Amino acid sequence: MAEGTKAKPAHGKARPRRGARERAASPHPRIAERRARVEDAARSQRRLRWVVLGSVLGILALVVGLALSPLFAVRTVVIHTGPHTPAAAVAAAAELSGRPAMVTLDPGAIAARVDTLAWVASTSVERRWPSTVVLTVVERTPVAVMTGRTGPMLVDASGRVLGPAPQHSGLVRVSVGTPVGAPGSQVPATGGGALAVASSLPPAFKAQVAEVVEQGGQVRLALRSPVTFKLGTTANLLSKYEAIAAVLAHAQLTVGDVVDVSTPSAVVISHG
């Protein structure tokens, strides 16, 4: 190596000076300012979210507190009912005497309790804020009189036993061989056919029917004449009614005659 010539660094490139390294590590003032603004905005948004959440929870707590307060408790119960279902019985079944909160009421459950009353067909429940509940009862319609354990009982088309029958109800009697139960109970399924007939008798001869009898799934009509019509099952009732009306209009029937319309197209008359 020539004398006076400086040697090159061992690693090829010269290391940057200390001041240069510090300047390279420090961000530009504008970048630092922008970063600070972004962080401030993020902190502000987080604080705002917590403030909004706290406000919402506070409002919800206030609303729930008011809804459950005596201010919005049931204070008035208005009852619209029929002649056979006393308002006192409806009120007792509804179970609203404890002044529950309006928001906690279950209209379906209230209606179901009232519907257990013998004469009730359906119940509507209406909330009128802030503290009134209106109950509207629709009563069942009796279609027949059946023998009960304590005397004649009114029965509707669904087989619900309604209550004692008055002496002159004007309804057809239905007999299924066994007495029916207490008001609110159901007629045995074996009497469903007789009730279906009793509730669907046409006006053309309904007034002439004294009794509908069902035995072993077979139904017959006992007229006031007295003449008996055998319907068989409850299938094709409309055709069977038409056959009965035709026989009554055109045939010469005498006391004790039995008319079999179980096959409407082939009516058989047996003279008594």
Image: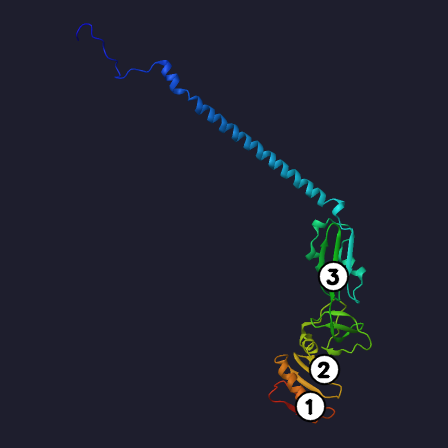
Q: Which mark is residue 136?
A: 3
Q: Quadrant of residue 229?
A: bottom right
119 lies above or below 73: below
Q: How many marks?
A: 3
Q: Residue at x 60, y 37 (%)?
A: 53
Q: Which residue is mark 2?
A: 206
Residue 117 on image: x %, y %: 75, 63
Q: Nearer the viewer, residue 104 or 259?
A: 104
For disc 3, the neighbor class at 10 Å (few under 14, some 14 to 19, many from 20) is: some
Q: Quadrant of residue 216?
A: bottom right
Tell me how far mark 2 sits from mark 1, CA to CA: 14 Å
Q: Quadrant of residue 184?
A: bottom right
- Amino acid type at circle 2 is Lys
Q: Nearer the viewer, residue 87 or 21?
A: 21
Q: Residue at x 63, y 37 (%)?
A: 55
Q: Nearer the viewer, residue 125 or 28?
A: 28
User: Quick one: label 3 or label 1, which is nearer the N terminus?
Assistant: 3
For disc 2, the neighbor class at 10 Å (few under 14, some 14 to 19, many from 20) is: some
- Amino acid type at circle 1 is Ala
For label 3, the SS is strand
Locate residue 107 relative to residue 150 in the image: left or right. left
User: Quick one: label 2 or label 1, which is nearer the N terminus?
Assistant: 2
Q: Nearer the viewer, residue 35 or 251?
A: 35
User: Quick one: label 3 or label 2, which is nearer the N terminus?
Assistant: 3
Quadrant showing the C terminus: bottom right
66 lies above or below 153: above
Q: Residue at x 38, y 20 (%)?
A: 24
Locate residue 10 relative to residue 242 in the image: left or right. left
Q: Which residue is mark 1?
A: 249
Residue 157 on image: x %, y %: 70, 73
- Amino acid type at circle 3 is Thr
The reply to whether discs 3 and 2 touch (Cβ–Cβ < 8 Å) is no
